[in-house]
Image (tube, grey):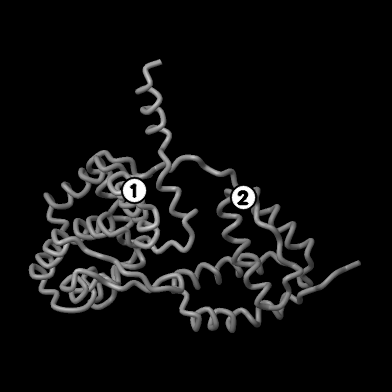
Amino acid sequence: MEGKILQKNIAETMLQAYVEEMKMEELSEATVEKYENDIRQWLRVSAERIQKMDLIRYKEDMCRIYKAASVNSKLISVNRYLKWLDYPELTVKTTKLQHKTGLENTLTKECYMKMISYARDTNKAKMYCIMKTIAQTGIRIGELKFVTVEAVRDGTTVVWNKGKFRNVYFTERLCWELQQYCRTYNIKSGIIFYGREAGKVITANTVWKNLKYIARQVNVPETMAYPHSFRHLFAKQYMKQIGDISELADLLGHSRLETTWIYTRTTAEEKRKQLEALEL
């Protein structure tokens, strides 16, 4: 039995409408772009008459090229589109991932101190403040647009992400440093961390490149130097000092505690040190 068939030309024709609907759902620009790119990648190699077996073969081909996590990410994009087209019968299962027991490549506090010290001493004020803001609040890189002059004045901001609102709080010390930064660079209102164009937030790619550069200057492994690693550091330090996982989930904007539990785990190096402390 041949099963349900999707005509490739229909999938191609309807893609723009799907993209517009995602925008109306207020998905982030990066998310919409990612979904669209994944779908176009699939369509470029798909048959003119798309059947379930074609999706299975596509999945197998992807597994030979990409890591499991990347394969799953691409399949989720395609599956989501197929369901939107009302072809759920063509969707395929994601690949199984081995559950990791540790949190590797997390920025250590020591490495964090090296990076912010270098940024401060070399007058890289914007990166200094960005690193401190993420590390002290746990916000995502895409949420820097909510760090405004007005928010810092109030000591808190409301973030809208992943379909919900959450409150983010700034310590008195962080507020003082950000206000000093704003005074120095004559930033009187709106977004604090803007890019080349005033009023528009600095891009994640620019932050990423600067973090890599700073890491190289102070011999911090580049695998640790990425924006989300500072969010990881915040969570690890919070659990170490305070230990309230429910409060941490609220601060990070997690809907499920299972997502937050990862920050209670230790890295392989931390596990080794704990074992050595047994002195057996």
The three-letter code of the residue at mark 2 reads Ile
Q: Residue at x 31, y 61 (%)?
A: 206
Residue 72 vertical position relative to residue 148 in the rendered view, above or below: above
Is residue 139 or residue 216 the one in the foreground?
139
Q: Residue at x 11, y 49 (%)?
A: 121
Residue of label 1:
243
Is residue 266 or residue 23 the one in the foreground?
266
Q: Position of residue 117 (x, y in %)?
A: 16, 47
In the rendered structure, the answer to whether residue 176 lies left or right of residue 6 reads left
Q: Quadrant of residue 191?
A: bottom left
In the rendered structure, the answer to whether residue 224 lies left or right of residue 195 reads right
The three-letter code of the residue at mark 1 reads Gly
Per the image, label 1 sits on a secondary structure element best described as loop
> CB of mark 1 within 8 Å of CB of mark 2?
no
Q: Position of residue 177 (x, y in %)?
A: 13, 61
Whichever of callouts 1 and 2 sits on the residue coming sooner in the sequence is 2
Residue 266 vertical position relative to residue 153 in the rendered view, above or below: above
Residue of label 2:
65
Is residue 93 or residue 32 the one in the foreground?
93
Residue 252 got which mark?
none
Q: Position of residue 216 (x, y in %)?
A: 27, 43
Residue 78 vertical position relative to residue 271 in the rendered view, above or below: below
- Mark 1 or 2: the one toward you: 1
Neighbour tally class for label 2: few under 14, some 14-19, many 20 plus, Cα within 10 Å: few
In the rendered structure, the answer to whether residue 228 lies left or right of residue 213 reads right
User: Alpha carbon of mark 1 to alpha carbon of mark 2: how far?
Assistant: 40 Å
Q: Residue at x 65, y 48 (%)?
A: 64
